[in-house]
Image (cartoon, rainbow, N blue to C red):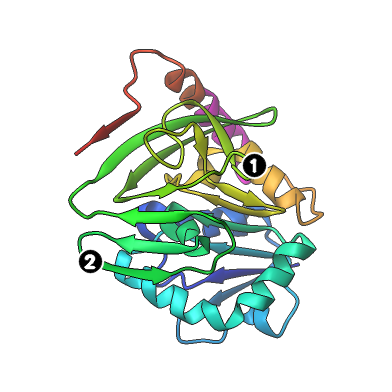
């Protein structure tokens, strides 16, 4: 099994680098390829079983889009083939149609996988939590962001929020999904926080694996679900 981690040297903010480490601990026999931004992505000319990319700064986001645009057709092939791809934090925004950097008064094109637009305002920071449902699976996570997505993701969302906001303050649908491409603005990092989701995501690649440190991870997960269900817990605010 081959797992490619994209641009981890610059795409690991908010603890998202731990997602890759948790995957590696869960899949100790897999081959992990860490691709730097200066490298040609391994997936371009080779078979991969899974891709991951984490949170990044706004300036890095533009560089990542520029890097991946020439390989858009190959990414679409992987998506259509059902390759599991996870993008966390603002990494999923690169798959939108456009990103409007309001503060800098500039707009760029994204990879255009989802018919959504992004607005990024560095004077409008949002911190929050999410308690969401993906089918029968309950997922918890945190958010810290300057950006929101706009458009209709009711047909392609990742989570339906029980508590917390979706792709924007008026939405209850969090993230985007196409086949096994999953984009979520949740950070925290999401995989260690949600061992059941980790097992689900790995299973998308046809691998039945037990999440690393499962007993301790499940204990923490169950405690956090209970906490997030408490009506006294505040779920979103501006800073």
The residue segment tinted magenta is 212-222
- Image mark for residue 118: none
Foreground of the two, 152 or 223: 152
Q: Main secondary structure of the magenta part?
A: helix
Foreground of the two, 37 or 125: 125
Q: Which residue is mark 2?
A: 105
Foreground of the two, 127 or 9: 127
Dividing the picture into quadrants, the one containing residue 46 is: bottom right
The x, y position of residue 3, in whole percent, is 66, 67
The answer, for residue 110, to whether it is visible in the render is yes
Position of residue 81 in the picture relative to residue 60 (left or right): right
Q: Which residue is mark 1?
A: 155
35 vs 38: above or below? above
Dot 1: what SS?
loop
Position of residue 23 in the picture relative to residue 120 (left or right): right
Foreground of the two, 103 or 45: 103
Position of residue 235 in the picture relative to residue 204 (left or right): left
Magenta span contains residue 221: yes
Q: Which residue occupies 72% across, 53% down?
A: 179
The answer, for residue 36, to whether it is visible in the render is no
Quadrant the C terminus occupies? top left
Q: Which residue occupies 53% across, 71% down?
A: 6
């Amino acid at each position: 099994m081959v797992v490619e981690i994209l641009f981890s040297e610059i795409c690991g903010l908010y603890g998202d680098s731990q997602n890759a480490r948790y995957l590696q601990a869960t899949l100790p026999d897999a081959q992990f390829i860490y691709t730097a931004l200066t490298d040609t992505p391994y997936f371009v000319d080779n078979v991969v079983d899974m891709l991951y990319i984490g949170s990044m700064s706004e300036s890095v986001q533009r560089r990542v889009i520029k890097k991946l645009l020439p390989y858009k057709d190959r990414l679409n092939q992987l998506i259509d083939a059902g390759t599991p791809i996870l993008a966390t934090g603002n990494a999923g925004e690169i798959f939108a149609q456009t990103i409007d950097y309001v503060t800098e008064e500039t707009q760029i094109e994204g990879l255009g996988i989802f018919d959504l637009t992004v607005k990024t305002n560095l004077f409008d920071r949002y911190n929050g939590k999410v308690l969401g449902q993906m089918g029968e699976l309950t997922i918890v996570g945190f958010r810290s962001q300057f950006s929101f997505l706009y458009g209709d993701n009711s047909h392609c969302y990742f989570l339906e929020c029980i508590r917390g906001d979706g792709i924007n303050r008026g939405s209850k649908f969090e993230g985007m999904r196409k086949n096994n491409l999953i984009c979520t603005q949740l950070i925290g990092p999401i995989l260690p926080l949600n061992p059941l989701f980790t097992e689900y995501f790995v299973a998308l690649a046809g691998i039945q694996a037990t999440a690393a440190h499962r007993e301790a991870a499940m204990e923490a997960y169950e405690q956090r679900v209970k906490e997030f269900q408490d009506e006294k817990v505040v779920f979103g605010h501006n800073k």
